[in-house]
């Protein structure tokens, strides 16, 4: 049997800390129209879930190969590992947080065939920014200059002015390995590879096609997360370039261009404060000057104007000379930073001055400020974290920010402070920990030593964060710059499942650490007893033996002022018949609804919109009816029926955006029966489909996807990691098959009657 032909392309992806992006990256390659490709994803001991994601995708597509390194070696080592596993004709390097555009591989294959397999193929890219904008590169004109040609780079030195990265070119594998090329350790390894390979190549072609979408990350990239001293490796990398060129004759002009690119790169790096802060600038310039003088080609002429003056000053290695040229922008940055902070001040002058004073006093290491839903009644994840902290970290004192309108509904044993008071500003200034399921106001300034814990309050079916820029229902009402400023305060981001983690990492690009713990608020679904279920149903007035259906729709962005039910609630309750009780919970954004109240007064339903605990409502109900609310993900923990009523799905996903197809009917996407009309919804209950085998199978797959981390111990994990500083996730996750959920109402009532009968049977 003849051996299988080698793939045309080996796409090598180093994988580290990219769990929010790697799925999109792999999908962009696997869905290309040109399919003769192998995709080698190299997990460089990533601390997040990136390795699990590439395993998952490799299991679904045989062209994807997941390779796991046994020790972390950096992006260069990961690329080398990929090359060792490659079998394709051409090597294509793609970073795990980038993607390639549709049709790219086919365009590349066609150009390679036309050019008769050159050693290197150059192509175009764009930069994508967090604000949604796309910036064209400057490569187009250069690539157009060699259109339809195959050239020697030494004779086309303008090609050296292309962005010096390895992901905007494809290398013929026999050329790359035959010359013995390997990536080095440390940052700036691309420049070394680009300038050495271009010096050796004799046949290079260009492709005027945008292949790569290069993501400009605000945080998390190796350039932004590396310590200042690691950026000093730039001098070693370029020294390797010039050592390599020194052994190859006929490259005098080539060396001059590379030298000019090197010095420009030194200056660019120096100007980025997040790479070379003020404390390291003097040492950086000294080393830059040494490298400049050591490798300056004979006859080299600096560029004219200010750029040339910068070259000359850098050659001297004098920091004082640079200061005189006003090249250091730290003062400007600090002034604008102060102005930005001043703009965030609000309230009366006395409160402002008091807050400023309090921020000068020491941080209280045992004080925690909690808040939920913009100061509403304490609840959700923050309340569950607070309860766990009282048990696991008793030294911590918790205070709750509660609006005056909601203070009466707060538990009496909680310490409460009202917003915009002296007590509030003192706590915000002095607390070590600040915990919220939304963002604290812009006027809150995070000071050194404080820890912000963002717990979130749902799993994202609808688009969140920066994704909202692309959907008309929300983007006009949001200031995304302010949003990112708020996100920059986060130290920890609590996640309920892998789906959430991937989205939070991508749509809230900042330097926070994801806590993959499950949602603390869902612990109760594994802790509540039959007595709890009976108690709650009794408080709600649900008669024994009745099936309680909780109808909890989400808010519509175009209907924020008043609750407008998409169901004819009176008709639906009537059609259900006397064996059912309909509990209706309007979204908390809505105020009291007169029509809902009237129906409740008539006994047609129970209005639970102001009931303080949504978790207790879930425990009391036999089934959930919802549309696109994240309550479905929490409710799935109970392993009780979920019915989706989605009469406006197309409008919702077009205007609001969604992260997956809830109505696909595929396992993992759809939690149970789907109805798109009232008639279908009524029939689902009359015919029994709501609690049938098909619904149970869909619910099980949904739970496996979204409830893997919710096992009753999420709050403990959060406290241990965020408050106690523990690195390991513990307790360990309990497998889904080994968990015991809170008893259903039917089981709780049956247990009660059995216990009652046993008591009667043993009575004297």
Image (tube, rainbow, N blue to C red):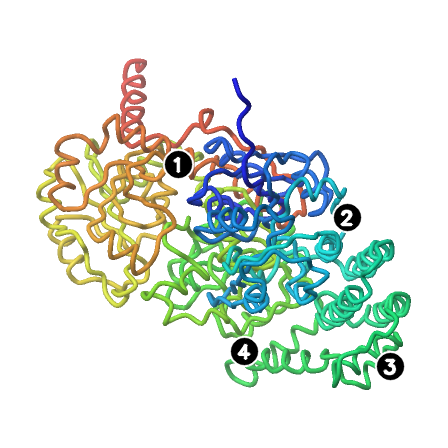
Name which of mark 1 and mark 2 comes first in the sequence. Answer: 2
Name which of mark 4 and mark 2 comes first in the sequence. Answer: 2
Q: Is residue 581 left or right of residue 256?
A: left
Q: Nearer the viewer, mark 4 or mark 2?
A: 2
Q: Quadrant of the C terminus?
A: top left
- According to the picture, the residue beneath numbered tag 3 turns out to be 320
Dot 1 falls on a residue whose secondary structure is helix
> Which of these two is toward me, 54 or 389?
54
Q: Measuring 63% from the left and 81% from the top, which residue is drawn there? A: 336
Q: Measuring 75% from the left and 45% from the top, which residue is drawn there? A: 181
The image quadrant that residue 451 belongs to is bottom right
- According to the picture, the residue beneath numbered tag 2 turns out to be 184
Q: Is residue 386 visible?
A: no
**Label disc, if present, on residue 637 of the rendered structure:** 1
Residue 231, how many percent across, how many down? Answer: 77, 60
Q: Nearer the viewer, mark 4 or mark 3?
A: 3
Residue 432, how many percent across, how many down? Answer: 64, 60
- Distance from disc 3 to disc 1, alpha carbons, whole Å, reads 64 Å
- According to the picture, the residue beneath numbered tag 4 turns out to be 344
Dot 2 falls on a residue whose secondary structure is loop
- Distance from disc 4 to disc 2, alpha carbons, whole Å, reads 45 Å
> Which of these two is toward me, 252 or 42?
252
- Distance from disc 4 to disc 3, alpha carbons, whole Å, reads 36 Å
Dot 3 falls on a residue whose secondary structure is helix
């Amino acid at each position: 049997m003849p051996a299988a032909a080698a793939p045309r392309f080996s796409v090598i992806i180093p994988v580290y800390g990219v769990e929010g992006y790697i799925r999109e990256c792999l999908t962009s390659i696997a869905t290309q129209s040109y399919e003769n490709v192998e995709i080698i994803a190299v997990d460089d001991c990533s601390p997040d879930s990136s390795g699990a994601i590439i395993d998952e995708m490799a299991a679904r597509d045989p062209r994807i190969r997941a390779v796991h390194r046994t020790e972390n070696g950096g992006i260069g080592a990961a690329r080398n590992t990929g090359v060792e596993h490659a079998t394709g004709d051409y090597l294509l390097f793609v970073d795990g947080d980038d993607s390639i555009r549709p049709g790219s591989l086919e365009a590349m294959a066609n150009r390679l065939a036309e050019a008769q397999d050159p050693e290197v193929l150059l192509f175009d890219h764009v930069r994508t920014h967090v604000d949604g904008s796309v910036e064209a590169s400057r490569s187009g004109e250069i690539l157009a200059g060699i259109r339809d040609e195959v050239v020697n780079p030494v004779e086309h030195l303008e090609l050296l002015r292309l962005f010096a990265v390895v992901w905007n070119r494809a290398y013929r594998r026999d050329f790359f390995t035959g010359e013995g090329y390997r990536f080095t350790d440390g940052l700036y390894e691309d420049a070394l590879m680009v300038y050495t390979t271009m010096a050796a190549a004799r046949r290079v072609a260009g492709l005027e096609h945008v292949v790569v979408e290069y993501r400009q990350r605000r945080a998390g990239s190796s350039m932004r997360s590396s310590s200042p001293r690691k950026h000093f490796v730039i001098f070693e990398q370029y020294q390797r370039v010039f050592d390599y060129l020194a052994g190859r004759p006929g490259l005098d002009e080539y060396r001059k261009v590379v030298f000019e690119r090197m010095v420009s790169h030194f200056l660019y790096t120096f100007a980025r404060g997040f790479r070379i802060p003020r404390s390291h600038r003097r040492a950086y310039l000294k080393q830059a000057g040494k490298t400049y003088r050591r490798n300056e080609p004979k006859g080299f002429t600096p560029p004219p104007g200010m750029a040339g003056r910068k070259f000359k000053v850098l050659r001297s290695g004098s920091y004082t000379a640079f200061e005189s040229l006003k090249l250091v922008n730290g003062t400007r940055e600090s002034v604008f930073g102060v102005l930005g902070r001043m703009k965030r001040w609000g309230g009366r002058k006395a409160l402002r001055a008091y807050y400023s004073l309090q921020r000068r006093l020491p941080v209280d290491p045992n004080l925690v400020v909690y808040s939920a839903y913009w100061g509403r009644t304490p609840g959700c994840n923050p309340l569950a974290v607070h309860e766990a902290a009282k048990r696991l970290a008793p030294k911590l004192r918790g205070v709750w920010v509660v609006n005056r309108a909601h203070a009466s509904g707060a538990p009496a044993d909680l310490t409460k402070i009202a917003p915009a008071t002296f007590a509030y500003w003192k706590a915000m200034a002095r607390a070590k920990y600040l915990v919220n399921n939304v963002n604290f106001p812009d006027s809150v300034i995070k000071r050194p030593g404080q820890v912000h814990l963002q717990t979130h309050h749902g799993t994202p079916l609808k688009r969140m964060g920066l994704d909202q820029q692309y959907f008309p229902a929300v983007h006009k009402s949001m200031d995304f710059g302010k949003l990112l400023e708020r996100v920059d305060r986060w130290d920890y981001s609590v996640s309920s499942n892998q789906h959430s983690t991937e989205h939070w990492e991508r749509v809230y690009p900042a330097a926070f650490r994801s806590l993959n713990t499950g949602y603390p608020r869902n612990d109760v679904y594994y802790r509540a007893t039959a007595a709890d279920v009976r108690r709650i149903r009794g408080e709600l007035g649900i008669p024994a033996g009745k099936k309680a259906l909780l109808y909890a729709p989400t808010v519509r962005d175009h209907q924020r002022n008043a609750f407008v039910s998409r169901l004819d609630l009176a008709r639906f309750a009537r059609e259900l018949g006397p064996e059912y009780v309909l509990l209706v919970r309007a979204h908390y954004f809505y105020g009291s609804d007169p029509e809902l109240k009237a129906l409740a007064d008539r006994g047609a339903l129970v209005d639970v919109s102001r009931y303080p605990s949504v978790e207790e409502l879930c425990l009391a109900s036999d089934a959930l009816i919802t549309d696109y609310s994240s309550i479905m993900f929490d409710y799935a923990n109970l392993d009780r029926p979920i019915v989706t009523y989605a009469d406006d799905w197309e409008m919702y996903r077009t205007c609001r955006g969604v992260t997956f197809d809830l109505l696909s009917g595929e396992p993992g996407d759809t939690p149970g029966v789907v109805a798109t009309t009232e008639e279908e919804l009524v029939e689902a209950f009359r015919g029994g489909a709501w609690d049938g085998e098909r619904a149970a199978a869909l619910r099980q797959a949904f739970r496996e996807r979204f409830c893997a981390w919710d096992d009753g111990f999420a709050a403990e994990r959060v406290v241990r990691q965020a408050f106690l500083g523990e690195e390991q996730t513990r307790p360990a996750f309990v497998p889904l098959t080994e968990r015991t959920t809170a008893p259903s109402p039917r089981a709780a009532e049956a247990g009660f009657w059995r216990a009652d009968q046993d008591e009667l049977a043993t009575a004297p």
